[in-house]
Amino acid sequence: MKIASFNINGVRARLPRLLEWLEETRPTVACLQEIKTQDEGFPAAEFERIGYQAIWHGQKGFNGVAILADGTMPVEVQRGLPGDAADEQARYLEAAVGGVLIANLYLPNGNPHPGPKFDYKLAWLERLRARLATLWASEQPCAVVGDFNVIPEDKDVFSVRAMASDALMQPEARDAYARILGDGWTDAIDTLNPRGGVWTFWDYQAGAWQRDHGFRIDHLLLSPELADRMVAAGVDKAYRGREKASDHAPVWVEVRD
């Protein structure tokens, strides 16, 4: 089983690139973030045409997440992150696919820092950790994937100095991510690339892609039941260089059936 995550930065704007990636790499499960469309605007028929079925949680103009599965319908488990009834942002979706529970998330960016957006990010991380404790207790194979908007360590960014004031690198956010790992979740990309230097995002500005000025904020976390089955993990970096590409590259993990 190949589980992938891709912040598509607008599912309709990037649809040709997204369909290319799906057909060329054929992940079993593809989790999308920042679909940036209301529910009725999601192009489900385009994915069905190439053999994928989907569930999605949309929002007008920004946010939004979706889970696609090759040849089967994802079975929805949870829509929206529990813990705050007033939170209407479409950032979280869970589904069961092939005996694995998939949690797909788009964590708040948190900029500008400090401020209410950063406070929201930290509160969201607390709620996420609580939800993951529930998943952990179920003792089923789980993958928690998506755009976490957290650069975990200095080895995960092209320049610590350039990003020092950004919400993605603040100690509070990093500590919250580290606590999740401390609960026993395995960061697939980091486990197989312990020296770092692996990027998943390159800004559209200042020639970041051309200069390889990137950082790692898209993560794949595995429960022990799934981590024991991990075969490989990586980043489909070349897709970032295509015409009208997302500013993120897809990330993926392969596990034994």
Image (cartoon, helix red, strand yellow):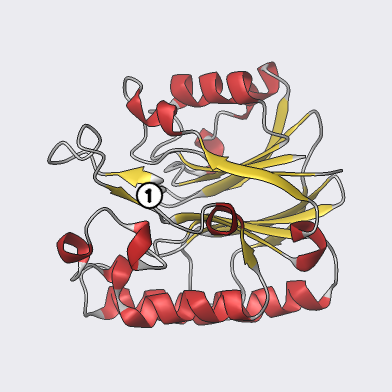
Q: Which residue lies furthest to the front in this view?
A: 195
Instruction: Please tell me how crowded label 1 is: few (under 14), some (14-19), or many (20+) other residues with Cα within 10 Å.
Output: some
Q: Using the rendered image of the protein, determine whether residue 55 is visible from the camera's viewpoint.
A: no
At horizontal 84% and vertical 73% (from top left) the residue drawn is: 138
The residue pinned by badge 1 equals: 62
In the image, taking residue 192 as reference, residue 15 lies left or right, namely left
At horizontal 79% and vertical 59% (from top left) the residue drawn is: 228
In the image, taking residue 108 as reference, residue 33 lies left or right, namely right
Relative to 208, is 176 above or below? below
Q: What element carries label 1?
A: loop
233, 179: nearer the viewer: 233
The quadrant where residue 159 appears: bottom left
Relative to 49, is 95 above or below? below
What amino acid type is highlighted by mark number 1? Phe
At horizontal 28% and vertical 79% (from top left) the residue drawn is: 116
Image x and y of residue 125, in percent: 49, 76
Image x and y of residue 181, in percent: 59, 74
Q: Which residue lies furthest to the left in this view?
A: 206
217, 131: nearer the viewer: 217
Image x and y of residue 106, in percent: 48, 57
**Where the N terminus falls, by quadrant?**
top right
How many numbered discs, if any? Answer: 1
At horizontal 87% and vertical 43% (from top left) the residue drawn is: 257
Relative to 212, is 225 above or below? below
Q: Using the rendered image of the protein, determine whether residue 113 is visible from the camera's viewpoint.
A: yes
